Image (cartoon, rainbow, N blue to C red):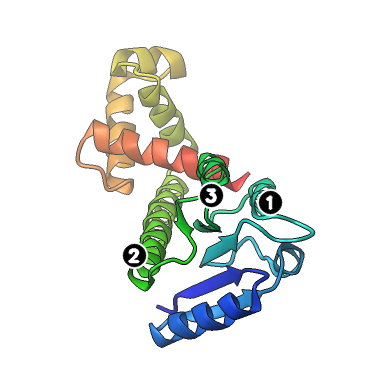
Amino acid sequence: MTKTIFLVDDDDAIRHSASFMLRHAGYTVKTYPDGVSFLDAYEPNDSACILLDVRMPVMDGLTVQQALSERGNKMPIIVLTGHGDVSVAVQAMKNGAIEFLEKPYEKKALLEAIETGFSRISDDEAQQGIKNEAVAKLTRLTTRESEVLDCLVEGMTNKAIADELSISPRTVEIHRANLMEKLEADSLSAALRVAFMAERGRKEAR
């Protein structure tokens, strides 16, 4: 997997030295001299780790971070701060940055922070895959099976479901067995997990 880093820093020397070091470490690096040019190029579906300098002219790092948040950014952000910018770094962390590094930062610390960022991406992608799979499984259900599942989610018994849907308890059992098979669930709790995961996936897609 190609690991891409977006480096946003107005300091030419830092952009040059950091990008050289990171490329040597095996990463693909795209550099931006300011927040405006980065936001112009930003695509929400990009999968990368963002290294974001705090002190920049025109648009500082916190403002860029806020703009990214408003666009639904999911990429991990590592904030780069100058000496004495601890309060700014704390604010960035509160706003969702995963780490902050004080300049001049050590190579080891930077690489560790970046790998933490990419592990977050892997976890998020794995979770999204599970949600997508759950949504796909629910599409296999008939309308009646979906209704039975909705009732199970509400905690209803087979008898209560039968009364709610005006069908026999035996028919409920058949629908329940069929939906469990289609959801590849070996227990009621497993079926409910699929239902809840699919609901999360649908909400995020809206």
Q: How far apart are marks 3 and 2 (CA)?
A: 22 Å
Location of mark 2 (residue)? 112
Question: Disc 3 designates what residue?
Answer: 84
In the image, 125 versus 202, the foreground residue is 125
- Mark 3 belongs to which amino acid? Gly
Q: Which residue lies furthest to the front in this view?
A: 84
Residue 124 in sight: yes
Give the number of the mark in front: 1 or 2: 2
Q: For the residue marked with disc 1, what is the amino acid?
A: Arg
Residue located 27% across and 24% down the image: 170
Q: Residue at x 40, y 84 (%)?
A: 26
Kindly state the secondary structure of the residue where label 3 is placed: loop
| Residue 186 location (% of width, % of height) | 20, 41
For residue 112, above or below residue 128: below
- Secondary structure state at the residue bearing disc 1: loop
Label 1 and label 2: CA atoms lie apart by 27 Å
In the picture, residue 39 is in which quadrant?
bottom right
In the rendered structure, the answer to whether residue 67 lies left or right of residue 120 reads right
In the rendered image, which residue does mark 1 sit on? Answer: 71
In the image, residue 131 lies at what x, y percent?
43, 49
Q: Which residue is drawn at 63% across and 68% down?
A: 9
Amino acid beneath label 2 = Glu
